Image (cartoon, helix red, strand yellow):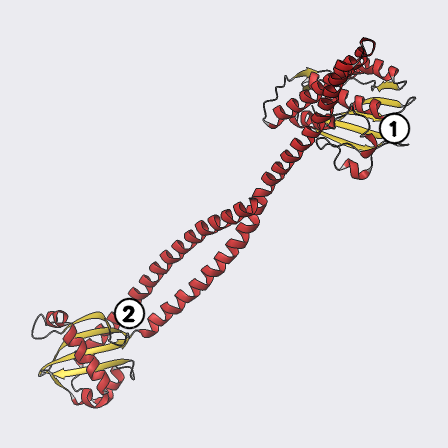
């Protein structure tokens, strides 16, 4: 499913950005081409003003002068005297060029008829564009030139193919740039959408793993309860108490598991409620110590607390939740430790940060397990035999600390064991 979504999002993002790129490129090309065409045509019109002015001032029109005027073939001049081609037109221009001039006059009668001098001593001309039958582009100037003793009609043709060829190659360049840009956009969108979907895919995988692990953990106490109830029905009265105690014990385990799962569910849905108050951290540690001292004594372990002599400022936190975190850490340390072991609570304050530590001298945690110790339902192989632990405590502890904008870390205790440290900002 994610592969299909990844592909569809890539094409969607690429298509949208490519459309924007193409629209911007076409808009720029349109304005650029329009400007280039206008400038080129205006330049041609300006040159025609100069050329026709030279015609009016020239007393004698010679082949040499006409050759200079035509810029040595840059302009094609078709000159007519009362409709009759001059010798220059008949001898210099090819049949194809004379035919082109005739076609221009035949296809633009309105323009030709509009070019009339204002007086007997002035000339008139008009410039326009023309596309030949062969698809060639021309700038045309049709002029009615007053020249003593009469007048001349001139069709001045300038090939604009160089301009349109420049426009064509400009379009090709933009096309290649757009194709390259779209390819880069596609690769970027492919990578971006993959990273975009990665947290969602990871969250779904974690959710699936959570459901599978939860189902496995729930199945065990339920199976024990059902089997104990079946045995209780068939057992003599003297043995029924044992099965009832088993059902009660497994029911309590099931209740704790469901409570932990509901806690994590509230964390995931951001509906966890916190009551932030100024809390004296040394008092909090002492209260936790007193609450868990009987558990340590029952396990024949030593629980101690190390508090500095200086007075620390109060910490803005939810005291009950932080006590819950310390309780989880102490319970794990006592549960995984051996008789005669040591569990130590510590408190430090530096750079506006409180560090609360729970260290033990137990079996410790492997480097590989440290990477997953806060994952849900994670338990080291060596501890799986202890059914009282579901692998949710440390995950809950991390969620509580994270909600306080703090961090929790695990490290090795010097001499053996593990140390969990909670960092909270003042």
Residue 362: give its label: 1
Residue 96 appearing in the image: yes
Question: Mark 2 and mark 1: span between their CA atoms?
Answer: 93 Å
Q: Residues within 10 Å of mark 2 (few under 14, many from 20)?
A: few
| Mark number displayed over residue 43 | 2
Q: Is residue 202 above or below residue 267?
A: below
| Of 247 and 354, the residue lying toward us | 247
In the drawing, does residue 141 fall left or right of residue 109? right
Q: Taking 113 as reference, is 375 above or below it?
A: above
User: In the structure shown, which secondary structural element does the residue marked by tag 1 occupy?
Assistant: loop
**Side of 309 where 25 appears, left or right:** left
Whether residue 322 is visible here, answered yes or no, is no
The residue depicted at 27 percent of the width and 71 percent of the height is: 44
x 16%, y 85%: residue = 59
Q: Quadrant of the C terminus?
A: top right
Coordinates of residue 285 in the picture (x, y in percent) = 78, 17
| In contact (CB < 8 Å): disc 2 and disc 1 | no
Question: Which percent across, then down, holds residue 147?
Answer: 12, 81
- Residue 44 or residue 413, whichever sits in front: 413
User: On the rendered structure, is 136 left or right of 305?
Assistant: left
Counting from the top left corner in percent of width and height, residue 322 is at: 71, 20
Mark 2 or mark 1: whose residue is earlier in sequence:
2
| Quarter of the image where the N terminus is located | top right
Mark identifier at residue 169: none
29 in relation to 149, above or below: above
SS of the residue under disc 2: helix
Q: Name the residue at the right extreme.
A: 340
Q: For the residue carrying disc 1, how many other residues have a C-alpha within 10 Å: few (<14), some (14-19), or many (20+)?
A: many
Across and down, in percent, residue 21 comes to 43, 54
Q: Quadrant of residue 83?
A: bottom left
**Which image quarter: residue 87?**
bottom left
């Amino acid at each position: 499913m994610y592969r299909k979504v990844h592909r569809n999002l890539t094409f969607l993002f690429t298509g949208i950005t490519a459309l924007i790129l193409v629209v911007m490129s076409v808009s720029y090309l349109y304005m650029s081409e329009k400007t280039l065409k206008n400038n080129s045509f205006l330049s041609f019109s300006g040159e025609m003003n100069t050329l026709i002015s030279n015609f009016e001032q020239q007393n004698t029109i010679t082949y040499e002068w006409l050759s200079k005027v035509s810029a040595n073939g840059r302009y094609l001049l078709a000159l007519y005297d009362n409709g009759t081609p001059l010798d220059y037109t008949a001898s210099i221009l090819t049949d194809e060029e004379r035919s082109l001039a005739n076609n221009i006059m035949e296809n633009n009668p309105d323009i030709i008829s509009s070019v009339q001098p204002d007086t007997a001593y002035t000339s008139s001309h008009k410039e326009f564009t023309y596309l030949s039958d062969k698809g060639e582009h021309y700038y045309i100037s049709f002029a009615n030139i007053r020249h003593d003793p009469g007048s001349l009609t001139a069709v001045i043709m300038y090939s604009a193919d160089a301009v349109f060829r420049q426009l064509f190659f400009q379009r090709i360049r933009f096309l290649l740039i757009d194709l390259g840009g779209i390819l880069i956009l596609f690769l970027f969108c492919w990578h971006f959408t993959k990273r975009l979907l990665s947290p969602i895919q990871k969250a779904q995988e974690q959710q699936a793993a959570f459901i599978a692990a939860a189902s496995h953990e729930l199945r065990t106490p339920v199976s024990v309860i059902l089997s104990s109830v079946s045995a209780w029905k068939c057992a003599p009265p003297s043995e029924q108490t044992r099965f009832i105690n088993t059902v009660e014990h497994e029911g309590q385990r099931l209740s704790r598991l469901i409570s932990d799962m509901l806690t994590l569910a509230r964390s995931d849905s951001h509906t966890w409620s916190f009551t932030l108050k100024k809390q004296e951290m040394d008092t909090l540690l002492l209260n936790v110590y007193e609450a868990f001292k009987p558990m340590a004594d029952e396990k024949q372990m030593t629980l101690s607390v190390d508090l500095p002599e200086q007075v620390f400022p109060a910490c803005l936190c939810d005291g009950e939740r932080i006590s819950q975190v310390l309780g989880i850490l102490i319970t794990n340390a006592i549960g995984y430790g051996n008789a005669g072991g040591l569990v130590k609570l510590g408190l430090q304050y530096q750079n506006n940060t409180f560090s609360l530590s729970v260290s033990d001298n137990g079996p410790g945690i492997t480097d590989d397990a440290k990477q997953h110790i806060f994952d849900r339902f994670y338990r080291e192989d060596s501890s799986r035999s202890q059914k009282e632990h579901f692998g949710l405590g440390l995950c809950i502890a991390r969620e509580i600390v994270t909600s306080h904008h703090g961090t929790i870390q695990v490290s090795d205790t010097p001499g053996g064991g593990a140390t969990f440290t909670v960092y909270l900002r003042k």
